[in-house]
Image (spheres, grey):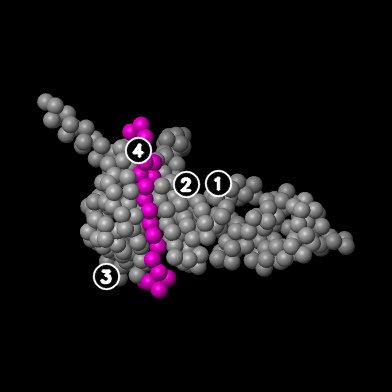
Amino acid sequence: MQQTRTSERTMKNKTTVERTSDRELVVTRAFNAPAHIVFEAWTKPDLLKRWWAPKSFGVTLFECEQDLRTGGTYRFAFGRDAKNPEVFSGRYIEVTPPSRLVLTQLYERISEVGEAVVTASFKESAGRTHLTLSQLFPSKEALEGALASGMEHGMRVTLDQLDELVDSMR
Amino acid sequence: MNTETLAALGEPNRLRIIELLRAGPRPVNDIRGRLGLRQSQASQHLKVLKDVGLVEIEPRAQQRFYRLRPQPLKQLHKWLDRYRHLWEERFEQLDEIVEELAQKEKSDAADKNK
């Protein structure tokens, strides 16, 4: 049983997370499908509702309204309680299927922090898609604040460096 | 865990100090010498690391040795890991949908060719 789980894990595409500057976090991941399919899953509300809220965190994406075109707006309401949801809202700066999606993102509960700019780029090669997801915060403090709230995190050191450090301390 | 700890680690020389101390406690002169830092620089960095609880001082004979405190780093690691885990879980759910869409596209294409 343990063996099976381990081999499944090694089959997974690896997710990397890195802080590339004071106010930017970058996540990368590959998918075993062409870019137009990954882009579709990123942009259709009924599909977004099935993946965007991680199940083990106990949260649900309740509402997903969007006007998917340059200048169009969107609103995601999610959380544990539909009556008192967390809300991300913003507008699309660029919508270029199937390769690029750029949008602003405001966390409404702490809107005074300002908008982040999220850029998702989908590069297809040999039938697979490489996603690079960048989140550019309005300030270093905004990134660190988001981090402190538990949603985001950041530092110059990559996770792999930290993995190594922590392993050596066990 | 707090943002001060993150900021403390964001400075390259402080990260080098942390890496050096993984090998064991060292006196300030040794740290300074190995990393090529000026006395004042080394003291300043060590003070920052001590203030956020990443290092502690251990008196030995006439010297003050600096020792790594792994607890904040372990906490930090847990925190960073949670963020990566958030995206990993999203992406696993996304994998299922992507596979489903790809299968559907294949079978639609096969139907067309009939």
Q: Quadrant of residue A98?
A: top left
User: Residue A83: which numbered mark, if any?
Assistant: 3
Tell me which label, 4 or 1, sits earlier in the chain.
4
Q: Name the amino acid type tagged 2.
A: Thr
Location of mark 2 (residue): A16
Q: Pointers 1 and 2 in contact (CB under 8 A)?
A: yes
> Magenta stretch?
A109-131
Quote the CA–CA distance across marks 1 and 3.
Answer: 39 Å
How far across and down, in percent of the image, does residue B93 sit? 33, 47
Residue A109 or residue B65, whichever sits in front: A109
Marks 3, 2 in one chain? yes
* A11 on left or right of B67: left
Disc 4: host chain? A
Circle 4: residue type: Glu
Q: Residue at x 31, y 37 (%)?
A: A33
Whether discs 1 and 3 lie on one chain: the answer is: yes
Disc 4/disc 1 C-alpha distance (Å): 26 Å
Q: Looking at the image, is mark 1 or mark 3 nearer the viewer?
A: 1
